[in-house]
Image (cartoon, rainbow, N blue to C red):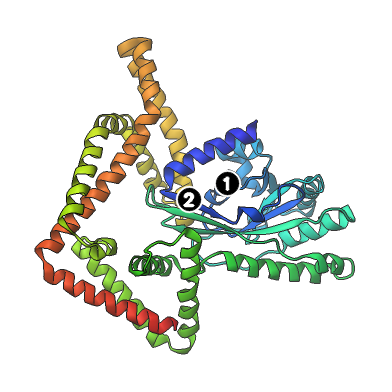
Amino acid sequence: MGYGLVRTLVRWILTLFYRRIDVVGLEHIPESGPLIVAANHQNALVDPMLLLALIPRRLVPVAKAPLFRHPIIGPFLRLVGAIPVHRRQEGNAEPARNRAMFAAATAHLAAGGSVLIFPEGVSQPEPTLMPLRSGASRMLLEVEAAMGGGPRVAQVPVGLVYHEPGTFRAGRAFLQIGASVITDDLVEMHATHPEGAAQLLTERLAAALRREIVESEDRETHRLLTALESITRADGPAGVRDAAGRAEWMRGPMGAYRYLGEREPWRVLGFRAEVERYLADLGRAGLSDRVLTRRYEAGPVTRYVLHEGASLLVALPLAAWGIASHFLPYELTSLVVRALRPEPDEEATFKMVASVVLYAVCWLAEGYLVWRLGGPWLLGLFAALLAPGGFFAIAWRDRIRRVGRDTLGFLRLVLDQDLRRRLAERRAALLGDLESLTR
């Protein structure tokens, strides 16, 4: 029951925070049998939250021991049955404690359970894979040795790819699940060369994870790569790629970027500067590439204005109520997170944890005031409208921002045809240079 409650709460929080979450490859998760889910780690507690919410197996996370003492996070870790790991950097990596961790994980896997582990050992904000530690591999090999046969332990790599991971309602998350790592030969090798088997399995896992993620050297490079993907997608014949297609496309130019960066760095730097200038020009003009490539005709524009205007007007009363009832906790969450100054990979985690506490406290305070002013009937109405009002407020805010951007972009392009021509020429040159670099 505890696991189900945590999973429901996590799904609700993630759905509110991220604009879009996509999952590909669920068919690689076995329905039963011992399972180790190994993922890259670049977004602190959000990474395990996504996996607990979206993987269709009950996962037991391996989490660093200090988190169990956290007044908010610790109880949730105990509810999901997490296993503490004691790391050297916390100064308490006693061999006996980590032997207990391995014993607990081994017992859980031997009983056919599933373990979630982040083999990098630490979260870091850059979209690149750090050197893996051997814990996930040693865990698998020791479980296999302890079971002495029976069903193999599946080690499934999961790649986590983010766009603006710490930004409320602008961020996106993508989980790509790969096929199980081949382990049969290394299980046999473990009997005679345990260290060598663990090292080889760690190398295989690292290669498998790299196939499922989009590695960039830093977040700014990833932002430029994401923008390029969006530009080429709008320029393509279908104009649509699913999440897996977007990730696959991004791996191509990133591979060319690394290859040419070592051999012809001047070309790479020149192209990067070209992308930065184009995006900066769009930003100064208040435009997006999507607006620039649209064809504006009287009929579609009129239908768009009528449809979006009517939707905004109809939703306005409930949205206004939602904004009013959520304004205080929203602003308090922003103030608290700014004051705490989290690291980039912890920003989303801080926002989510702070919101869970502050929204609950503010709602209770608002509910008390409503009860004092209007009694139980008004309090019941307040409680009934709280959730739908919040959802309407988010949807209404997102829509009015989009309509505002589209309207301003349309007016700028209509009033300044020369601007459209200049940007279109820059865009065409950019796409031509991209094709040349990736050929």
Up-down: is 409 above or below 432?
above
Against 275, is 65 above or below? Answer: above
SS assignment at label 2: strand
Q: Is residue 285 left or right of residue 435?
A: left
Residue 21 numbered tag: 2
Q: Please name the amino acid that badge 2 sits on.
A: Ile
Between 126 and 387, the one nearer to me in the picture? 387
Where's residue 208, x and y in %?
A: 64, 67
What residue is at 89 percent from the left and 66 percent from the top? 191
Give the residue furthest to the front. 299
Instruction: Identify the residue at the far bottom of this view.
Output: 263
| Residue marked by disc 1 | 54
Dot 1: within a 10 Å radius of its alpha carbon, few (fewer than 14), some, or many (20 or more) residues? some
The relative height of residue 365 versus residue 51 in the rendered view (above or below) is: above
Residue drawn at x 39%, y 22% is 384
Q: Residue at x 41, y 83 (%)?
A: 437
Closer to the camera in the image, 356 or 212: 212
In this view, the residue in front, 279 or 411, is 411
Q: Is residue 428 left or right of residue 353?
A: left
Contact check, label 1 and label 2, Cβ < 8 Å: yes
